[in-house]
Image (cartoon, rainbow, N blue to C red):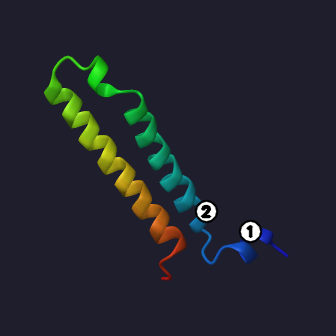
Amino acid sequence: MNTLRNTFDSPLEPLGAAVGAFLVLAALGTLIGAPWATAQTMLVAIIQIVGALLMGGIGAGILYVSFVVDG
């Protein structure tokens, strides 16, 4: 009996969960690191913040697809 196969519907589900969680944690780490405090200009800080928020959204979407959507 394969425990991993019995736990997850798809063999790629754990990979999706790991990638999604990594992206969310990396986005949080970027925002906690306060890019506005070290950026040369405010435009660069805004781009970094928007990028981190998009990365967190993509990671949350991957987690949602991994666990909620059956397909």
Q: Amino acid at mark 2?
A: Pro
Labels 1 & 2 near each other (Cβ < 8 A): yes
Q: Residue furthest bottom?
A: 71
Residue 8 x %, y %: 66, 73
Residue tagged by mark 2?
A: 14
Q: Nearer the viewer, residue 37 or 7?
A: 37
Rate crowding at label 1 as few (under 14), some (14 to 19) or many (20 or more) other CA atoms within 10 Å: few
> Which comes sooner in the sequence, label 1 or label 2?
1
**Rendering quarter of residue 51:** top left
Residue 3 x %, y %: 80, 70
Q: CA distance from mark 1 to mark 2?
A: 9 Å
Left or right position of 13 against 64: right
Quadrant of the frame with the N terminus:
bottom right
Residue 50 x %, y %: 24, 42
Q: Nearer the viewer, residue 29 or 6?
A: 29
**Rendering quarter of residue 59:** bottom left
Left or right position of 1 against 53: right
Q: Which mark is residue 51?
A: none
- Assign a secondary structure to mark 2: helix
Give the answer, above or below, for where 57 lies relative to 2.
Answer: above
Residue tagged by mark 1?
A: 4
Residue shown at 32%/47% (left/top)?
A: 53
- Assign a secondary structure to mark 1: helix
Q: Amino acid at mark 1?
A: Leu
Numbered label tally: 2
Give the answer, above or below, for where 22 lies relative to 12.
Answer: above
Residue 43 x %, y %: 14, 29
